[in-house]
Image: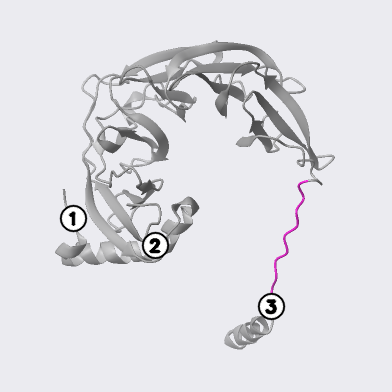
Amino acid sequence: MLSRLLWVFAVFLGHCSFALKFSSVTDHVRLGDARGKVVGFVDFNADKATDILFQTDNSISVYLWSREKQRFHLHQLLSLNGSSVVDTVAVDLDADGQVDLLTLTREGGRCHSMTVYWMKPHSRGPAIEYQEVIGNGVLSPPLVLDGNGDHIPDLLTHSCLNNTSTLWLSKEFLREFQKETISLSLNYTSSYYVDLTDDNLADVVVEGRGSSGRSLLFWQRNPSCGDETSFLSPSLPVPLPFPLSSAAVFSPLTFNDIDGDGEIEAVGVTCPDPDCTTAHVHILSHQSSFPTSPDGCGVSGTQPVNFTQVHTVAVHGESVSLSSHPPVLGQLYTYIVRVSRYSLATATPSLIRRP
């Protein structure tokens, strides 16, 4: 009986056609006058609705969603006369339940200043309580990550003046930062949270680019340290042997267990040129050999991490747009798994390139 019902259902689907119709609701939800670039989708006023943050060269505004009226309404947050806003980050830095603003404004040349706008908590509308410049000489927008495992957002910046980086550890309700200097010539571009060691604790992987190319740094959660300082020291950069031509295109990294061995691998896609007639899929794996911190818990010092490249697979085809990543990687995923598992089982030299 069940098989007959399934057959009838299949026949029914075969004779039906489905169509999706998309309509523009921009004006209906009152976003027709929005100007600037979108820099964040956040619940800015803690009403459990998603709001949209916009930035122009000299202003920041938020469109707040009204559940009752089912539309957005504009709230101008700040206007900066004579300053050029390069980037805006919306994040709750002091753990008061209210999203704060961090802006990067141009100082001159490659250098920028970093300003925090502390928002007033529990107010009827978004209101700036006060602002302060917390850093100068910053090269690029800061990365937001949990640098010491206390579940409070911290900041990672790179200097435009020398080859040093700074980890800004938030002291939450005090609205202060403890600064840790990292002497590494690496400009950070992205960060990831992933359990690398299968201990059910999220580790931090930071990706950056330096004079020698792409590199990874790691903060590993240390269960014995508790929440206050539960990350090991950042590792020395682990170089990624990706092509380094000026025209090379890089995709973000994706982390997954590619070969089914229970260990997490990092997968990246690169193209030697913008046309991307050949996409190179790089699969990197680590061997769970993280060292213990020599000085117990903390964020000082450096530790190496055994994370090595084990595969480089060239995928030939027509133009592949990495701007649509991760769909591009999704299309290649089945192929990657098949190739990597086959090569691990048979040790085919043509499919494995070890460092």
* Majority secondary structure of magenta residues: loop
Q: Which mark is residue 353?
A: 1
Residue labelled with disc 2: 332
Residue 68: where, in percent of width, then height? 84, 39
- Between the C-alphas of marks 3 and 1, the distance is 48 Å
Residue labelled with disc 3: 17
Along the polypeptide, which appears first: circle 2 or circle 3? Answer: 3
- SS category of the residue bearing label 2: helix
Q: Which mark is residue 299?
A: none
**Residue at 76% of width from left, 23% of height from top?**
125
Please give left or right for residue 344 compared with residue 80 in the image.
Answer: left
Please give left or right for residue 17 compared with residue 335 in the image.
Answer: right
Looking at the rendering, which quadrant does residue 341 occupy?
Answer: bottom left
Please give left or right for residue 118 compared with residue 227 in the image.
Answer: right
Residue 20 shown in magenta: yes
Label 1 neighbour load within 10 Å: few <14, some 14-19, many 20+: few
> Is residue 175 something that shows in the picture?
no
- Between the C-alphas of marks 1 and 2, the distance is 19 Å
Q: The N terminus appears in which quarter of the rendering?
A: bottom right
> For the residue marked with disc 2, what is the amino acid?
Leu
**Residue at 70% of width from left, 23% of height from top?**
77
- Between the C-alphas of marks 2 and 3, the distance is 29 Å
Which of 112 and 292 lies nearest the eye of the viewer? 112
Residue 318: where, in percent of width, then height? 40, 65
Residue 196: where, in percent of width, then height? 32, 42
Which of 323 and 345 lies nearest the eye of the viewer? 323
Looking at the rendering, which quadrant does residue 186 occupy?
Answer: top left
> For the residue marked with disc 1, what is the amino acid?
Arg
Q: Nearer the viewer, mark 3 or mark 1?
A: 1
Check the image and report above or below for 229 versus 196.
above
